[in-house]
Structures are given as structure tokens and as C-alpha cells.
Amino acid sequence: MDTADFRVLFIFERGGFAGGIERFVFQTAGLLQAAGMKVYGSFERPDREPERFAQNFDGLFPPDRLPDADFAVIHKITDTDRLEALIGHWGNRLALYVHDHDYYCPRTYRYLPFGRCDCRKAYSMLRCGLCAMATSPRRWRNGFFGELAARTTGCRKRLELLRQIRRVAVLSDFMRGNLTDNGFAPETVTVIPPPIEVPAELPPRQESEPPKLLFTGQLIRGKGVDQLLRALPLLRHDYQLIIAGEGNQRPELEQLASELGVTDHVTFTGWVSDPERLYSECDIAVLPFFWQEPFGLVGPEAAARRLPVAAFRMGGISEWLQDGENGFAVPPRDIPAFAAAVDRLLADRNLRQQFGQRGRELVQQRFSNAEYVRRFRQWAQEGVS
């Protein structure tokens, strides 16, 4: 496929750096531009740093005035009426990227409300709709009956529409399995591992004393920062923890840090626009995810900068984190095991360096920009042929 005049349209909800999806959209738009494609974007509402976000696009358009394109990719749309209109307008030129569990889990978290156990069942309108209603009424935007309709018949209709799209991409085999379990035809779902920027050169790492742990991400329940904080009193070696991110759980987490007596060891930075700077300043990346993480982009991003990783073995994490090779992967929600893994890294500088170097090598081998562009180009060509 000649990409010189090939036009791609990315469709998403937030035009700015709201979270991992938007960072992925921004990064991949820039890569496809560099490969010679024209990349347009359409979003429903602006978010953080919209001007910088716009720099990786050849044009940004409102939902009611879309440009013509050869290939349109939905990255995140939840409005059923809009989705139906997009399918009708674009036909076989429309593709879908699935980044999270929202489309087949009305609750969105993929774990049960009582006991917070993982859910591995396929979507069922009644069961999943009632599960999703087990939340605070303050989150019901349309009253009880409106919310119930949205989470039952509304979710079912959206899922039925999405299954009509014949080109679907995910970041991991784990997510591919989730989609096929939920009625997507296996031949329509393609795994395209994400591109991870690997700096050509890294300055010699100046190890901190005490070593610095780093969490980057949204401060919401599924990211498991409460589990991370509960692991801190179990650590035997000195540390500092940097928590970089923002979210509705932050006040609760700050209170928990105080209750656990670890406030002097923890810094909440708020949202940061340049997490790369923190990777260079810290020594260990910690991923305490509670939910079934679709991929965990921040892990390979940290590994690309020679940080070892400690994480719970959740979702797609095991597809890039090899226990005992580039970090430690421990059983889900086993806080003592997580603390022990972090402690081993805190205690052994040579082990940190060994894991960090191996992690960088693995990222270079598996997640290169060139390989991502090649796979995307092939996927797009299949979508328009």
C-alpha cells in the first residue's frame, strides 16, 4: 500500500491527555504521520493540553463534520446513536481499537462489586446490567430507570453494533480472548502490540539513595494504588515512592497514606505531562493494578528506560513482564508477595541493573515503532481492500 496519500481518521472522545488511551492515540498518530500518512482526528470534548495534543494530527474535526478518509478507526466511542451512524457512513472502511473492558462490561472494571473478585464471564444483558447497577446512586446520570436502560438494553445494542465491524485491533492476546469470548468473530480480531519509544542513548543512571519507586497512572480504584500503599509498611528497606497521576481516588489515597504512617515516604505529584523525566529520576517501576489490565503500557515504557518492574500478574501484564527476567510478577492482590518483590529490588542494585537492561532489550525486540507501523499498514490495507 502506498502510504503517501493514505488518509487515516482517528475517532475518540477526549481531545487531550486524559489517560492511557489518549496518550496512545497521540503517539501512534505521530508515528503514522512520520510514515507518510495523513492523520486526522475527531473528538467529542477537549481535555488536558489540547494544543500540544493537536500537533500530531493533520487536522482535528468535530463529530458532526468529519473529513473524508480512506480508513477510519474508532478508539473510544460509547454513544450508541453515534456509533450506528459511523457504521452506516463508513461501512468496510471503519475499524475498531478496543483498549479496555467497557464494551462488554457495563460496570467497566471487570470485577465484581462484592468482594472485588475478577469476573471472567461473557457478557449477559441481565446479569451484567444488574451488576453494573451495584454502585452509588450519585453516579446515575439519568435516574434509576434511565441508568438501568443504559446498562442493559443500551449496552447490548452497542455490543451488537460493534460486532458488525470487520476489522478490530487489540494490544494483547488477553484482550483478543476477551473479545472472542464476547461474540467477536476470531478472524476479525488482530493483535497489534503497541509501539514503545526506546531512547537511542540513555545517560548512566544515577541511583537514588534511598531508591525511588515510581507509579504513573490515573488515581482510580482499578489502578490499585491502595494496594501499593498497603504494601509499604511491609518493606524492610528504605525507599521513596513517587505517585504521578490524578484521579477521583486521590483524597482517599492521601488519607490512607497518613493512616498507614508512610506519608514521609510518599510524594503525590499530580498529573505530569512528561513521565519520561520521572523514569530517568526513579529506580523501580511499580504496577499494583487491581483490575484486569488490558496491557499496561507504562510498564514497557519504564523498561525502555532501564527500570525493573514489580507488578501483579493481571490481564495482559504477563505478555511483556517475564518474572525473574525483567522484573517480578506476583499473584494478583497478594500484597505480602508484592512487598517481598519490591524489597528484593530495593536491596540489590545489581539485580535492578540486570533486570533494567534485559527489559530494555525485550522492548527493543518486540515493540519497535517500525514494527507497529508495518502491522498497522497491513491491517489498514486489509480493511480497505
Image (spheres, rainbow, N blue to C red):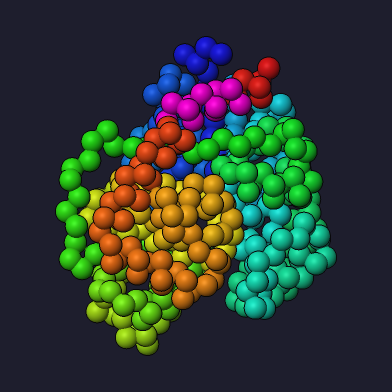
Q: Quadrant of residue 241?
A: bottom left
Closer to us: 265 or 104: 265
Would residue 23 be counted in the magenta stretch?
A: no
Determine if residue 135 is in view.
no
How many numbered dots are placed on residues in this image?
A: 0
| Residue 105 x %, y % | 69, 59
- Asked whether, in this view, residue 162 is left or right of residue 207, the answer is right
Identified at 54% across, 52% down, the residue is 318
Residue 319 horizontal side relative to residue 350, left or right: right
In the figure, is residue 7 to the left or right of 381?
A: left
Vertical side of 219 occupied by 280: above or below: above
Residue 371 in the magenta stretch? The answer is: yes
Give the quadrant of residue 150.
bottom right
| The C terminus sits in image quarter | top right
Q: Residue at x 28, y 51 (%)?
A: 353
Q: In the rendering, at what x and y percent does residue 252 appear?
A: 43, 79
Q: Position of residue 129 (x, y in %)?
A: 76, 66
Vertical comparison of 328 with 259: above or below: above
Please name the residue shown 66% across and 22% down the image: 382
Magenta portion: prevailing SS class:
helix
Q: Which residues are magenta?
A: 369-379
Q: Residue at x 31, y 77 (%)?
A: 236
Can I make out residue 182 in this image? yes
In depth, the one of 369 and 231 nearer the eye is 231
Where does residue 248 sit, x and y in percent of width and height? 46, 70
* Up-down relation of residue 45 to residue 381 (above or below): below
Q: Nearer the viewer, residue 70 or 108?
A: 108
